[in-house]
């Protein structure tokens, strides 16, 4: 990667605009994400490749669920009529743009 030197001005809210040559070199655009790493007195800016949000509450719940599944605890079979209707529904094509008739309760 070529050496690029650009200067950005910090706003009163602590924000900067990443200069265009830097954005282009990193391959980021509107909505893209960059990470800042402080190493001594230098700030290293890198493109975020795969930003996976980790919610600690969801992570804990999924870990608990995984333990229950592995141990067979708190597990039961689906009622036969529900399992049968689910298997029948799999055979039907689904049109996600189709309007929903009737009330929907969540």
Image (cartoon, rainbow, N blue to C red):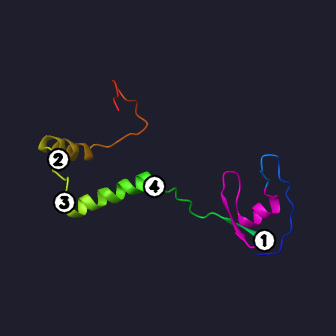
**Residue beneath the point at 86% across and 68% down:** 5
**Image marks 1 and 3: residues in contact by CB distance under 8 Å:** no
Query: Which callout, 2 or 3, points at the residue further toward the start of the chain?
Result: 3
The residue to which callout 3 is attached is 72
**Circle 2: is it few (<14), some (14-19), or many (20+) Cα within 10 Å?**
few
Q: Which mark is residue 92?
A: none
Is residue 48 rendered to the left or right of residue 58? right
Stretch of the chain drawn in magenta: 18-41
Disc number lying in front (2 or 3): 3
| Secondary element at tag 3 | loop
In the depicted structure, whether residue 82 falls above or below residue 69? above
Q: Position of residue 54 (x, y in %)?
A: 49, 57
Disc number lying in front (4 or 2): 4
Query: Which callout, 1 or 2, points at the residue further toward the start of the chain?
Result: 1
**Circle 4: is it few (<14), some (14-19), or many (20+) Cα within 10 Å?**
few
Q: Measure how far apart labels 4 and 3 are at the Cα level.
A: 24 Å
Dividing the picture into quarters, in which one does residue 8 lie? bottom right
Q: Which mark is residue 78?
A: 2
Query: Which callout, 4 or 3, points at the residue further toward the start of the chain?
Result: 4
Disc number lying in front (1 or 3): 1
Query: Which callout, 1 or 3, points at the residue further toward the start of the chain?
Result: 1
Q: Measure how far apart labels 1 and 2 are at the Cα level.
A: 59 Å
Is residue 55 rendered to the left or right of residue 25? left
Q: Nearer the viewer, residue 98 or 34?
A: 34
| Secondary element at tag 2 | loop
**Residue beneath the point at 22% across and 44% down:** 86
Is residue 22 rendered to the left or right of residue 74? right
Magenta stretch encompasses residue 31: yes
The residue to which callout 4 is attached is 56
Name of the residue lying farthest toward the left:
80
């Amino acid at each position: 990667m070529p050496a690029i030197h650009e200067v950005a001005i910090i706003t009163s809210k602590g924000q900067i605009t990443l200069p265009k040559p830097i954005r282009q070199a990193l391959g980021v655009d509107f909505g893209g994400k960059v990470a800042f790493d402080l190493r001594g007195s230098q700030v290293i800016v890198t493109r975020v490749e795969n930003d996976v949000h980790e919610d600690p509450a969801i992570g804990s719940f999924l870990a608990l669920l995984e333990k229950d599944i592995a141990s067979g605890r708190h597990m039961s079979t689906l009622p036969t009529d529900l399992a049968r209707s689910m298997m029948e529904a799999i055979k039907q094509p689904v049109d996600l743009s189709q309007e929903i008739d009737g009330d929907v309760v969540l």
